[in-house]
Amino acid sequence: MFDKILIANRGEIACRVIETCRRMGVRTVAVFSDADRGARHVAMADEAVHLGGPKPADSYLKGDAIIAAARATGAQAIHPGYGFLSENPDFVEAVEAAGLVFVGPSAKAIRAMGLKDAAKALMAEAGVPVVPGYHGDNQDPEHLSGAADAIGYPVLIKAVAGGGGKGMRLVTKAQDFAAALDSARGEAATAFGNTDVLVEKFVGTPRHIEVQVFGDGTRAVHLFERDCSLQRRHQKVIEEAPAPGMTPAMRAAMGAAAVRAAEAIGYAGAGTVEFIVDASDGLRDDRFYFMEMNTRLQVEHPVTEAITGADLVEWQLRVAAGEELPATQDDLSISGHAFEARLYAEDAPKGFLPATGTLTHLAFPEGARADTGVREGDEISPWYDPMIAKLIVHGPTREVALRQLERALAGTEVAGTVTNLAFLRALALHDGFRAGDVDTGLIDRDLAALSAETRPCTRTQAIAAATAMGLDRAGPYLQGFTLWAPLRQSCRLTMGEEVVEAVVEPGRDGVRVSLNETVHMLEWDGARWCVDGAPVPATGVCHGAGVSVFWGNNYHFGRVDPLDVGGDAGAAAGRIEAPMPGLVKSVHVTAGQAVTAGDRLAVLEAMKMEHSLTAGRDGVVAEVLAAAGDQVEAGAPLIVLEEEEG
């Protein structure tokens, strides 16, 4: 076994690897950017090496600097985590050329699965089912259009070097194919530098089921399946293992196909074979098709660990150190059910807009595993993915585990930034999801209801007002202090676009909070609030951004700021501002140009996503205040329209 390894990553996966290394007695070296100088993974590691600036290209993607850090610190191996350089075959070869061990598959295996068209041809040759389609080299538009006609509409156009839904277009009729092809190629060129596409049959009731595999370079085993069908914009939201409705016959067929895929490329380490499943007639062992193989550890690996009892990071280290596979297929079995929910700093009611902020309060409930790379007081940076944590639960049955998931989400407390907690809770309570009736379109079908803004009741508002006045830990109230009249104080808080006007009157028996015509009596019993004589499971905290109350969902209130102007109002008035810190990717207008409401004016890149900024009204561009390549702060003016007459 290694004495010391370097972890070429950040955030929760770096912390996750460090935890296993500590248990195994392996010392760790962290790497960090300027933005991560005080990060949790840096504090956890035995040593840490600075790489460079906050941009990934200046830090976590600098393979030569990472290898130099490993050699300088005496690390024997490099664990890539996921993302960044984890699936870069050139980096793997450079690591090995430096006399170090790459904790993962060979460069040859990564290349074999790197391009979707070549990978599918290889899988078909190995006897792995693939979606009917065209995966050839001829990229002539007429040839591709003819292939689509032969396959039969609807079809999917996919970038061969794609991922995350980029370069993917659904085409339902032949006359739309040419425009969709141009659009897919344009996006693929920007995202991957490769315009080649493949064309596949569109699966009507799709489920995304993947199989965890593990190999030693010759042999492989599978650790059963995960269902990742709950997705938005082709990004996974909640994953579970095993897949609901899975039959023994289909599990055996999918597992065997995944093992064939891994052994066909001499795979070593942890990998995931992803399948698209046609669930229009239930789960059938002749209705699953290979999509792609992720040649790394997956974000959702904890649910597999929960149902099998395996530590996949430990397995990675042991196999990379030259040991045999830790288990045979007959040794592996499924115990219970597990879920993982991805907690992000993002605003679901506003189209899942990524957010920044300082985590002024952060607490996870007992009984749930929380894989996180942040602590209370840490900043959610605009430079990286805005994940706060992954919440993982395990129970003897799916029903029990799902109840545990909802309870864990309800007990998670985050203040200082908006999160998708309410959205995740709504999903956990969704009738179709609870029944196991899932497919990749579930979220989109019910998106409005799932992402609706949760409104705090008057009891929650009263707790917020009392907390804002510093009365959340008081009691007995004002003992020994008497005035001729009750002590009354006004408290003004914002609740979205509304202003909450509260009158707070502390007295001997508690706090009286008046909200217009509604009055509540509050008491703090030393552990929780009592509202109108009934104890409630709610707590509140004050922080730099205002006040937060945690009661099932996280409710946030701000202080009234008369100078604050909403972003939508600014856009409608002709002032287009950056909604968050980010990089201006492109500007699509010039001064003097006429625009109409909804026209794209600029594209801002933040937190690994691109955001189009559009005109809120018709008008003429008066000023362009930013250019492509500019790094801007939240609220920075980018484009100004001429004032409307009258």
Image (spheres, grey):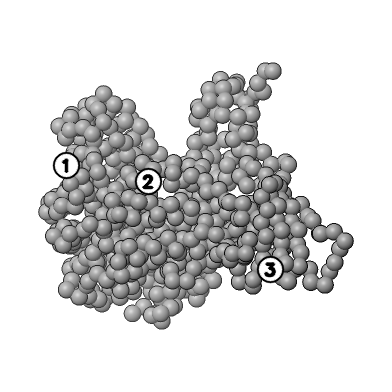
Q: Residue furthest top?
A: 645
For label 3, the SS is loop
Q: Is residue 144 above or below residue 30?
A: above
Q: Quadrant of the C terminus?
A: top right
Question: Residue 144 vs residue 163: left or right?
Answer: left
Q: Is residue 331 above or below residue 523?
A: below
Query: Where in the figure is residue 59, as x and y percent of width and height?
Result: 49, 57
Q: Is residue 366 above or below residue 199?
A: below
Query: Where in the figure is residue 520, as x and y percent of width and height?
Result: 66, 56
> Which one is in front, 77 or 471?
471
* Camera-nearest label, 3 or 1: 3
Residue named by callout 2:
443
Residue drawn at the location 36% of the way across and 78% of the way down: 2
Query: Where in the figure is residue 608, as x and y percent of width and height?
Result: 46, 48
Q: Quadrant of the N terminus?
A: bottom left
Mark 3 / mark 2, whichever is N-terminal: 2
Residue named by callout 1:
132
